[in-house]
Image (spheres, grey):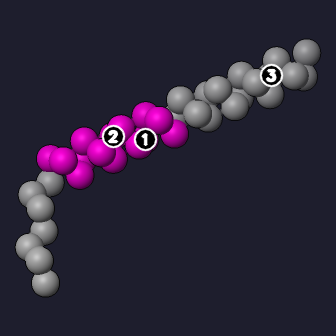
Amino acid sequence: MITGLVVGFLIDLAVTALFLGALLLVFAAMRPPRPPP
């Protein structure tokens, strides 16, 4: 009952974290590399 809700919440959190990580990776890959100092 509560356990299923918690597991669903954790899975949702993990999927969101993976999605944000992939989005950040794509954004970093699309950006031109910054020149070295």
Give residue 23's mark.
2
Q: Which mark is residue 4?
A: none
Q: Amino acid at mark 1?
A: Leu
Q: Residue at x 25, y 41 (%)?
A: 26
Which image quarter holds the N terminus? top right
- Does 19 appear in magenta? yes
Q: Amino acid at mark 2?
A: Leu
Range of magenta residues: 17-30
Residue at 87% in and 22% down: 3
Q: How many C-alpha atoms fall within 10 Å of the one at disc 2: few (<14), some, or many (≥20)? A: few
Q: Are marks 1 and 2 in contact (CB under 8 Å)?
A: yes
Residue named by callout 3? 5
Going by the picture, which residue comes out furthest to the front? 36
Depth order, front residue of 33/9: 33
Q: Position of residue 33 (x, y in %)?
A: 12, 62
Q: CA distance from mark 3 to mark 2?
A: 27 Å
Q: Is residue 33 toward the left or the right of residue 26 in the image?
A: left
Are discs 3 and 1 less than 8 Å apart at CB?
A: no
Q: Earlier in the sequence, mark 3 or mark 2?
A: 3
14 w.r.t. 36: above or below: above
Residue 35: give x, y in percent of width and height. Answer: 8, 73
Q: Is residue 31 magenta?
A: no
| Numbered label attached to residue 20 | 1
Q: Is residue 12 left or right of residue 20?
A: right
* Label 2 residue SS: helix
Residue type at mark 3 is Leu
